[in-house]
Image (cartoon, helix red, strand yellow):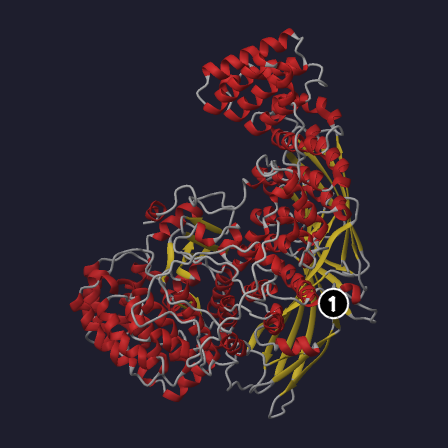
Amino acid sequence: MAQAGQDAKFFTRGKIEEFRADLHAADAKDKKFVKRKTVLKKIVANITMGNDMSPLFTDVVQSLGTPLLEIKKMVYLFLVSYGRSAKPEQINMVIPFFLQDVNDRNPLIRALAIRTMSYIPIPVVTDALTESLRHCLRDRDPYVRKTAAICVAKLYAADPRRAEKGGFVEMLRDLMLDANATVVANAVAALSEIGDRPDGVIFKLNLTAANKLLSALDESSEWGQIYIMDSLLRFVPERHSDAEIMAERIVVQLQHANSAVVLTTIKILLYLMNYMENRRLIEYLCKKMGPPLVALLSSGPEVQYVALRNILLIIQRRPAVLKNDVKVFFCKYNDPIYVKLAKLEIMYRLARAENCREVLAELQEYASEVDVDFVRKAVRSIGRLAIKVEPGADGCIQTLLELIEAGLAYVVQEAVIVIKDIFRRYPGKYEGIIPKLCEHLDSLDEPESKAAIVWIIGQFADRIDNADDLLEVLVDTFLEESVEVQLALLTATVKLFIYKSKSEKAKELVHKILKWATEEVDNPDLRDRGFMYWRMLAINPTLAGEIVLAEKPPITTDSDRMDRGALDQLLLHTGTLGSIYHKNPETFIRNAAGRALTDSPALNPNSRAVLVHLPRPQIPGPPGLAPTDSLIPGEDAAPAPPLPPRRNPAPQDSHTDDDDVGDDSDNDAETAQNRNDDPYSNLDSAFSTYLADEPKPMGAGAHRGRNDDDLLF
Amino acid sequence: MLSAFFIFNQKGEVLISRLYRTDFKRSIADVFRIQVVSNSDVRSPIITLGSTSFFHVRINNLYVVAVTKTNANAALVFEFCYRFINICKSYFGKIDEEAIKNNFALVYELIDEICDFGYPQNSEIDTLKSYITTESVVSQNIPADESSKITSQATGAISWRRPDVKYKKNEAFVDVIETVNLSMSAKGNVLRAEVDGHIMMRAYLSGTPECKFGLNDKLVIDKSQGGGGGDAVELDDCRFHQCVRLNEFDATRTISFIPPDGEFELMGYRSTSNVKLPLRVIPTVTEVGSGQVNYDVVVKANFSNKLAATNVVLRIPTPLNTTTADCKVATGKAKYAPSENVMIWKIPRIQGGQECIFSATAILTTSVTNRQVWARPPIDVDFQVLMFTASGLIVRFLKVFEKTSYQSIKWVRYLTKASGGYQIRF
């Protein structure tokens, strides 16, 4: 329907003076306002290109008298761009035009006027807006009301106290009962925005209010459905049935074409499941969630990525959601790298004895691809698979050996790193392959892989005939190595000496390295360890042997499984940035609102046992305006029923008495067991490094705060 | 939610820049230019620096970018970008640098309308076109009742349709388009076969038509419960356009809706059981020493001889150190494309049941510098087969009810295709 525009020619840098002259020339003999339109378009193009057009403020504003909507919209765009920095007398020229438009007969114009005014958060405009906004919130046209609802959020951002004193938050609450679903959705969006501010008015929902919102769901636009469902996190079910009925109402939304609707629905379902009792329903919901999640993999790659990162979280908490679907996560050759890496992680999580062979065959395929990162991660995954799935370990080792045979340096390095862990997981089973590894000593030039092979040589020095020769070569470059390798060399040499205390070479080596470690090196850890070994060896060599060669705690794969309390908390952010990075937003975004499950009589005991408490900064509101919990005017929140006495079960209980349908309870119990038996399983985590290439926000954590933000200006 | 929205061209020049919030200056665009446009190795569609996150979608020669300082709903942000792209395609016929530059004033109007303070608003194309137009509108001339019609549509329960649509001839076209994704192992085992189906509808129907749509599906929520059922097709899942009443679907499995005017995607679905693979590819690739690779590839059309596959393109990878490749084919044309390290075999048409054969020899350089391990990427096949569905899906009926009870003509077309996801390893 649209005729093709021809405006590309306006994308050339112009001079203020020229534009000003053109604007004045357009005052005369410009019947259809063609000239004026042209010069305004040039100005807008120049704003886009970053050319400062603010000196033209007075001239441009003159065009507001032109009765052409297109021109009005361009002038408004100009005002949104420069209004904030304009002089008061300049802005004063504009206000009458705004006020005229606010009273226009055409609802689109009325809405446009308040929308634009609220984008200029300076006192003069805000003053004028406040009165108009009050009328617009009660406008007979729903389009104006839905625009006004968002304006309240803008007003609150510009001047919170004015918005509160003016009673606008209460008016928003009234709009939650509006007959028009779009108005309701925008009111909810605005209240949520305000409620998430550190200084905002708290926004909570009781059952009546939540049900009212749900009844607007069917008639809402897809975006409105998201705003409404999102707000259900502010409703805390007091009875199991409340959570269950609500879940049944929203579950149909899983069939929506919009991935954000689907993920938001899943977020709410997962949230409500914490307050449910009916296991059959929980089971049913888990089953219902799987197919729509998989369906997201046929969306654009960006949405696929969001879905994959979320799936990774969801299956850790609710394995029943995607139990038998590992094949759908196999990588396509032309998937973008970020999709491939995310899929790899999920493949590993879903691997088990029954599908291990298929998964391994895929991983082997990936190990010959082009992208170095992807290949390395694939090789690591093979090793992790060996550690996770015992029946598959033989196959994994075989594959790793084939890969080593092929001799690609970075593949060999990765393989050696994981094989070290495999040795620890299955002592006495695969040491026969050590000679093969030692053949590739030369291709190991990265600290991690070098440290791994050094550990292997030291640990098994009694079975490697030429261990002393090998170490002698490696020790040669001791002083140039990274600390990681130095530490490994130090320990390995000591082990060698303990195994072969008769060997002159071992004695010589250990002496050399202890001297270096204690005299030539600045690193305190290295020096301390050097001194410690030295003294032990000097005082009681037998005891030293027992200590250095003590039995190692077994390696497990649970340290890469997220703790349940943390998962419960993180899943409240399903679909958001936090769920991509697997971090709570308040840890990497300034002023971001944290979330945590709220205790209630309906909260299931296991969720309660791992409950994370979230301190909300309580900023006292202005006198007379106490934060209210009840949202339906005239209806007070019923006093909460007393909470059951807090049960603080020991960690084992929380796992054996598992409420989760589908949660691998065996697996879980075993996890708990290991966690208790093995105090080092977290400290000496073999897997900490596997998370090194996780997606993460840049600069977050390391030096948070003002500096980061300043960087951006 | 969104703080800013940008469009960049390939050089990183800003074509559209709209700030929805005051927490940024326009110069935030420079950060994106440095971090993404001029970075040759972008490994994520989301980049977070400090508290600021950039979301981007690449389309043709453009970057569509949203910036936020909150813990934004990432799915929503990307869906918004996709929607923006669709709106542009509908308004301008395409989306690229030229289209955006030529219509930038209109684009600004659109993004002011479809997003307020970073919250996506009504973005139904049909409604938008009723009040955001390329023709100059004189504000005083819009009659009040006309504009309130628009506003009630933009905020109403059927925001995707104008009430006053009229056609002389009432027609509805249904296109069932299935994309087959296949991953076959070197041994000829199907590792993964999946149909990504889309039911596109073009509705040229007057008034407010009530439509009911039926397929030969049995939606299987739990496969273990599924009994037999004749020619019924198992869909792993399906998802619907905003217009479909999901409650009704949930209760009675009927797809009922009031369609938008014109073209839209009614339904998307996925099927993984009993996928019929239209083309069978059997490659035999042998490396002769380190200097030569021999190829024999057979393609068989595995469907009724009344149908035909068209636009068949096979891309058969060669080692990176290939110097020349000599291809021989009896059907179609084949040539070596050195820049992509593939041999491209194009067959305009393969009748059902037909078999085509390709043989080639690639000569490799043996210079030591080029001796990288060859990753053996899979053979990729593109094709189209009309009036065939890989899932076996059939449209049973499409009923249209309207209060004026006019006659309507319905057309159904089926197409199965592969583009970039039909891969055979060797």
Question: How packed is label 1: few (under 14 Cα within 10 Å), some, or many (20 or more)?
Answer: some
The residue nearer to you, when weighing A279 against B104, is: A279
The residue nearer to you, when weighing A557 against A713, is: A557
The residue nearer to you, when weighing A311 against B295, is: A311
Q: Position of residue A82 (x, y in %)?
A: 26, 63
Task: Name the chain under label 1.
Answer: B
Seen as rendered, the residue at the extreme top is A504
Q: Position of residue B307 (x, y in %)?
A: 77, 65
Q: Position of residue A16 (x, y in %)?
A: 21, 59
Q: Residue at x 48, y 16 (%)?
A: A518
Q: Seen in the image, is A29 located left or right of residue A381?
A: left
Q: Residue at x 38, y 74 (%)?
A: A149
Q: For numbered disc 1, what is the local secondary structure?
A: loop
Q: Seen in the image, is B212 located left or right of residue A201?
A: right
Q: Position of residue A707 (x, y in %)?
A: 34, 45
Seen as rendered, the residue at the extreme left is A89
| As drawn, A57 above or below B170 | above
The residue nearer to you, when weighing B242 against B344, is: B242
Q: Which residue is mark 1?
A: B220
Residue B349 picture quarter: bottom right
Q: Amino acid at mark 1?
A: Val
Seen as rendered, the residue at the extreme bottom is B404
| As drawn, B332 above or below A209 | above
Q: Residue at x 67, y 37 (%)?
A: A383
Residue B19 picture quarter: bottom left
Q: Residue at x 79, y 44 (%)?
A: B187
| As drawn, A399 above or below A587 | above
| As drawn, B90 above or below A574 | below
